[in-house]
Image (cartoon, rainbow, N blue to C red):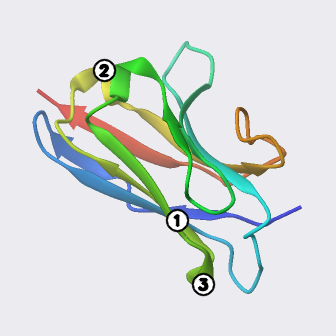
Amino acid sequence: QVHLVESGGGVGQAGGSLRLSCVAPGQTFNTYALGWFRQAPGKERELVAAINWSGSVTDYVDSVKGRFTISRDNAKSTVFLQLNSLKPVDTAVYYCGAGRNTRNPNDCWGQGTQVTVSS
C-alpha cells in the first residue's frame, strides 16, 4: 500500500488549465503504475489517465485525449495531471490511484481533490 496525497484542484474557467499533483511522501512508488480517476456527482468513478512504472507508456480515456497529460517523477515520488482546454464536464473529484495493473491502477487511493470548471 502507498499513501497518496493529491493537490492542485480548484476552480478553472472553460478553456483554461489546471495542474494536479499527487505525492507519496517518503515512499518509493517507482514499481507502481499510477492513474488519475475522477468521479462526478451521480456517476461512477472512471479512469481518466494512466502511466506505467517508468513513464514510457500512457493511456487516456477518449474524452480527455489531446487535452490532459499524465506524467511522473519517480525521484520525487510524484505524479502529475495537466488539464488543458477545460470543459464544464470535467468537473469532478479527481483521485490519484496506484497499483500493479497499468490498465487499472486502483489498489490504493488518495483522498481526492475537487476540480470545478465554470463556463
Instruction: Identify the amino acid type marked 1.
Output: Arg
Instruction: Identify the amino acid type marked 2.
Output: Val
Q: Position of residue 20 (x, y in %)?
A: 41, 57
Farthest residue in the right direction? 1
Left or right relative to 36: residue 82: left
Residue at position x 34%, y 29% in the image:
65
* CA neighbours of label 1 inside 10 A, class few (<14), some (14 to 19), many (20+): many
Q: Quadrant of the C terminus?
A: top left
Q: Position of residue 2 (x, y in %)?
A: 81, 65
Mark whose residue sits in front, 2 or 1: 1
Q: Are marks 3 and 1 in contact (CB under 8 Å)?
A: no
Q: Position of residue 84 (x, y in %)?
A: 21, 43
**On screen, residue 52 above or below 54:** above
Q: Secondary structure at mark 3?
A: helix
Q: Earlier in the sequence, mark 3 or mark 2?
A: 3
Q: Which mark is residue 72?
A: 1
Report which residue position mark 2 lands on.
Answer: 89
Report which residue position mark 3 lands on.
Answer: 75
